[in-house]
Amino acid sequence: MAFGIRRKELMNWKESVKRGEIAILTHYWEDERFPASTSVTKVGCINLDQLSKWGEKYQLKPEWIHRSSYPHFDVFGKKQKEILQKEGLQEQINRFNI
């Protein structure tokens, strides 16, 4: 379940993904499989080759891409913070207490 973001933020992320841009969105999240994680960062792009190449920078494997209408990686934990820092998204780190 996702929460803590505004509808406009989600819509902007979806539009960026569909335009073939690397789009990054963090939100609060609950998943019983990952009880220690309270947020997730979704990194998406409709262009799977571009998304795979982006993921290589952070040791993310192409098989980890969720192939949906909005292809994306789900990133959480230490890797989430590393990516947000390297991508210059300190606001998301602060906002979601990562």
Image (spheres, grey):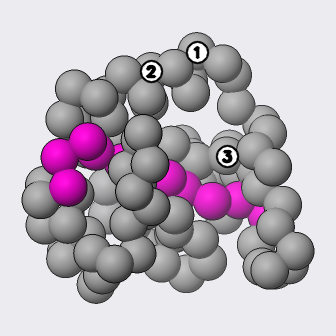
Q: Which residue is mark 2?
A: 12
Cβ atoms under marks 3 and 2 closer than 8 Å:
no
Decide which of tag 3 and tag 1 comes sooner along the chain: 1
Q: Which residues are magenta?
A: 38-48
Decide which of tag 3 and tag 2 comes sooner along the chain: 2
Residue at 61% x, 77% y: name it.
Answer: 77
In the image, farthest residue toward the top: 8
How far is mark 1 from mark 2, CA to CA?
6 Å
> Which amino acid, mark 1?
Lys
Q: Secondary structure at mark 1?
A: helix
Q: Which residue is mark 1?
A: 8
Q: Is residue 19 magenta?
A: no
Q: Secondary structure at mark 2?
A: helix
Q: Nearer the viewer, residue 82 or 49?
A: 49
Q: Which residue is mark 3?
A: 27
> Which amino acid, mark 3?
His
How far is mark 3 from mark 2, CA to CA?
14 Å
Q: Whole-percent x and y of residue 3?
A: 79, 39
Q: Residue 96: which numbered mark, if any?
A: none
> Which amino acid, mark 2?
Asn
Residue at 77% x, 79% y: name it.
Answer: 34
Q: Is residue 45 magenta?
A: yes
| Residue 68 in view, yes or no | yes
Cβ atoms under marks 1 and 2 closer than 8 Å:
yes
